[in-house]
Image (cartoon, rainbow, N blue to C red):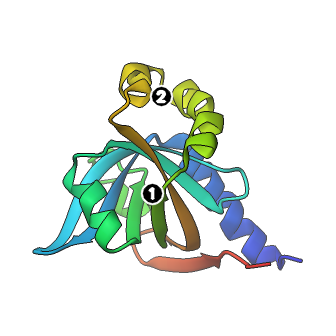
Amino acid sequence: MQKPAEAAVRDKVSRLLGSQSLGVLSTQGEQGPYSSLVAFTNSADLRHIYFATSRTTRKFANLARVPRIAMLIDSRANQSLDFHSAQAVTVIGDAAPLGRQAADRLRADYIDRHPYLKDFVNASSCALVEIQAARYILVERFQNVVEYVIQTD
């Protein structure tokens, strides 16, 4: 059972993810860290985040090499008020391409959230990737940092 403070952090993370459609995915390549902007969707329980990418991208090659990722999702508007009102969450987890059956089940939900990516997502060169989230680090009001750890069964 979640403590009230954990539930509040979880709700804030859920609202932030629901309000944003893009995140910055960080992977580890042979030459060091690499970041990419990706359109994402997430499971309601926050255990999984999904994104689409071409199998020929650097991020896809990096994930095959090192599946550990960090992903930043934030609410900034590039205004000075962001220092006091923006939220940012870093997701820490492992990523891997979904198998065909799982990708087929997820594809419609992903396209519902990102209809402008329909042709891309349906291309044979596209992979749907699942991040298994381990924890979320939420930053608010510039310095207030709290964590939400995904409980394993």
**Which residue is rendered at x = 83% and y = 79% of the image?**
3
**Image check: 140 left or right of 80?**
right
Callout 1 crowding tier (Cα within 10 Å): few <14, some 14–19, many ≥20: some
x 37%, y 30%: residue: 124
Q: Can residue 67 be seen in this view?
A: yes
Amino acid at circle 2: His
The residue labelled by disc 1 is: 85
Residue 146 versus residue 141: which sits nearer the camera?
146
**Of the pair 75 and 83, the residue shown nearer to us:** 75
Q: Residue 114 carries which label?
A: 2
Q: Which residue is drawn at 57% across and 66% down?
A: 132
Residue 89 visible in the snapshot: no
Q: What amino acid is labelled 1 in the image?
A: Ser
Name the residue at 22% across, 46% down: 56
Disc 1/disc 2 C-alpha distance (Å): 26 Å
Answer above or below: position of 84 versus 125. Answer: below
